Image (tube, rainbow, N blue to C red):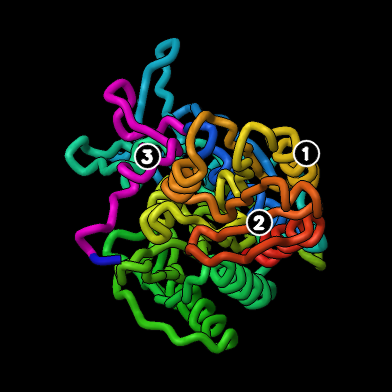
Amino acid sequence: MSEKHLKDHREIGRKLDLFSFHEYAPGAIFWHPKGWIIYQTLVNFIRKRSKAEGYLEISTPVMVKSLLYKNSGHWQHFGENIFNLKVDGEDYSLKPMNCPESTIIYGSKIRSYNDLPIKLSEFGILHRKELSGVLGGALRVRQFVIDDAHLFVRPDQIQQEIHKLLILTIEVYKSLNFKPRFYLATRPDKAMGDEITWKQAESDLEKALKKAKVKYDIKPKDGAFYGPKIDIHIKDSQDRDWQLATIQLDFQIPKSMRLTYVDKDGSKKEPVMIHQGIFGSLERFIGIITEHFQGAFPVWLSPIQVIVVPISDKFTDYAQKVASDIISNSIRCEVNIRNNTLPAKIRDATLQKIPYICVVGQKEANSNKVSVRKLTGENLGGIQNKKFIQRIKNEIANKT
């Protein structure tokens, strides 16, 4: 598609009825039913992968006393981006990140060296104070959710866990046909902790990158204030560079939050914290892939995966039966029974970017088939209903 015909995610979202924005809530998204399907599909995808890797999902408060961020160090390094308010004469904040609150759960009981690694995931609503001039649809917002995870590990577990995270990220991006590129971001000028600890953390991340046999470049002085990180970038269909995933190694927050575990010899040791987000902000990620696919999402992500179109009212019952069979197999399907011509219905399905259009008439009803046309324009001809359903199920399972 030529560049002049490429559409912004806001226009695509409006035309496909995915999401919208309103002056009542600058910097936030109103998710429509179809857009929310995409959102939940991505969340459930990561949730399933995380559960298989031993993560435990948590939920923490959106509003907490500001003292938490002062103790964690975020107030000193990130305070200008935090929304604050007074409640009963005390200072409260809307949480801008999940990590300080995950430490509350870790620290809620005594931990043994045998308990580690402890992997806590969370899809918490976050708020960050962004100037109105830099807000940009879903790509720059004030309210968002990160597919967040925090791992509490022993020093001897760092390499293994970071290696697993690198492999997981590569596999997730592969499902969207993204080829990740890796960067090691080092100590910024404004940072917590001493240089020796930072050098150790940077060395740990570099070893993990080399072990995973991935090429990487250096981002000098671009680490988080509490630790170095691996930033993972992709290029979209328009050859634009986006930083998405991040894996951060943190020796500082466990210290500032006084986290410990009981080691083999009975002594108390500080765990190391690994921060991980694969998609990053889900709002931003969906904005990016909406433009990347120009609304023509892969089958597994598409809000409507199949539409059944009867050639006339005479075949509505058969169309409804076909759709019912498809829906019973956990495939998102609709029937177009509006009083339009067949070409108009096909055009409407094409404009709605529905991956599969099934046309049914007398021939299909007699043979228990559907006549299948793909969004790409490819005509697959008549296919037995069961065979077609299995085809879609395979595409969804394989994330194709």
Report if residue 73 is visible in the image: no
Q: Is residue 360 above or below residue 227?
A: above
For the N terminus, give its image quadrant: bottom left
Q: Nearer the viewer, residue 322 or 5?
A: 322
Near-viewer residue (270 or 69): 69
Q: Nearer the viewer, residue 311 or 146?
A: 311
Rendered position, 172 above or below 320: below
Which residue is at 70% across, 40% downward?
Answer: 319
Tell me residue 189's x, y (percent). 27, 65
Highlighted range, magenta = 3-31
Say whether marks 1 and 2 touch (CB < 8 Å): no
**Does the magenta portion include 400?**
no
Disc 1/disc 2 C-alpha distance (Å): 15 Å
Give the mark nearer the N terminus: 1 vs 2. 1
Marks 3 and 1: in contact by CB < 8 Å? Answer: no
- Vertical arrangement, residue 180 with respect to residue 73, above or below: below
Determine which residue is flagged by label 3.
Answer: 15
Which residue in the structure is indicated by mark 1?
321
Q: Is residue 6 magenta?
A: yes
Q: Secondary structure at mark 2?
A: strand
- How many neighbours does mark 2 have within 10 angstroms: few (below 14), some (14-19), or many (20 or more)? many
Asked if the residue at tag 3 contacts the one at tag 2, i.e. Cβ–Cβ closer than 8 Å, the answer is no
Q: Is residue 265 visible?
A: yes
The type of residue carrying mark 3 is Lys
Q: Which residue was labeled with disc 2?
A: 371
What residue is at 45 percent from the left and 68 percent from the top? 229
Q: Residue furthest top?
A: 88
